[in-house]
Amino acid sequence: MADIKPHNYDTLLSPIITEKSTLVAEENKVIFRVPLTATKPMIKEAVESLFKVDVTKVNTILVKGKTKRFRGMLGRRSDYKKAIVTLKDGQSVDITTGL
């Protein structure tokens, strides 16, 4: 496992806590919001060093921003990237505690 580096804190922006993310937590998976420039090896290194766990797989999803109206004006939400991190069997990450 790698040492904690300052850029690891920039790689994981926030955990995504939804009903679906709590269901996949039973399968040793954790979902994070990451920058658009983050790569799978960067995400794997960050999770392993910050949480002291072994990562077996990283899947990423690019979520396109929705077009919304506000007072008759069209606007667009920002695009963002999600990372679904699969952990080794028997390991877990406590997201409720801050880093």
Image (cartoon, rainbow, N blue to C red):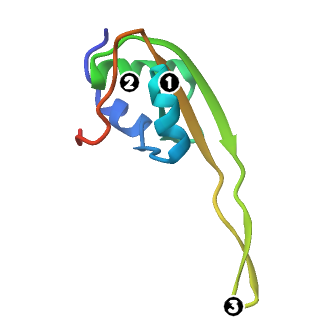
- The residue carrying pointer 1 sits among few (fewer than 14), some (14 to 19) or many (20 or more) residues within 10 Å by Cα, namely many
- Return the x and y of residue 20 as percentages of the image width and height: 55, 41
The circle on residue 85 is 1
- Is 69 above or below relative to 72? above
Question: Hey, what amino acid is under mark 3?
Answer: Arg
Tell me what residue is drawn at x 63 percent, y 59 percent. 78
| Whether label 1 touches label 3, CB < 8 Å | no
Tell me what residue is drawn at x 41 percent, y 9 percent. 89
Mark 1 and mark 3: Cα distance apart in space:
39 Å
Q: Choose the circle earlier in sequence order: 2 or 3.
A: 2
| Whether label 2 touches label 1, CB < 8 Å | yes
- Is 53 above or below relative to 10? above
Question: Hey, what amino acid is under mark 1?
Answer: Val
Q: Quadrant of the N terminus?
A: top left
**Left or right placement of residue 64 versus residue 17 in this view:** right
> Total marks drawn?
3
- Return the x and y of residue 14 as percentages of the image width and height: 41, 45
- Is 57 above or below relative to 5? above
The residue beneath circle 3 is: 71
Residue 86 appears in the picture as rendered:
yes
- The residue carrying pointer 2 sits among few (fewer than 14), some (14 to 19) or many (20 or more) residues within 10 Å by Cα, namely many
- The residue carrying pointer 3 sits among few (fewer than 14), some (14 to 19) or many (20 or more) residues within 10 Å by Cα, namely few
- Return the x and y of residue 95 as percentages of the image width and height: 32, 37
Q: Choose the circle earlier in sequence order: 1 or 3.
A: 3
Tell me what residue is drawn at x 55 percent, y 29 percent. 84
SS state under label 2: helix
The residue beneath circle 2 is: 47
**Left or right placement of residue 20 versus residue 11 in this view:** right
Question: Hey, what amino acid is under mark 2?
Answer: Val
Mark 2 and mark 3: Cα distance apart in space:
41 Å
Quadrant in the picture for residue 50: top left
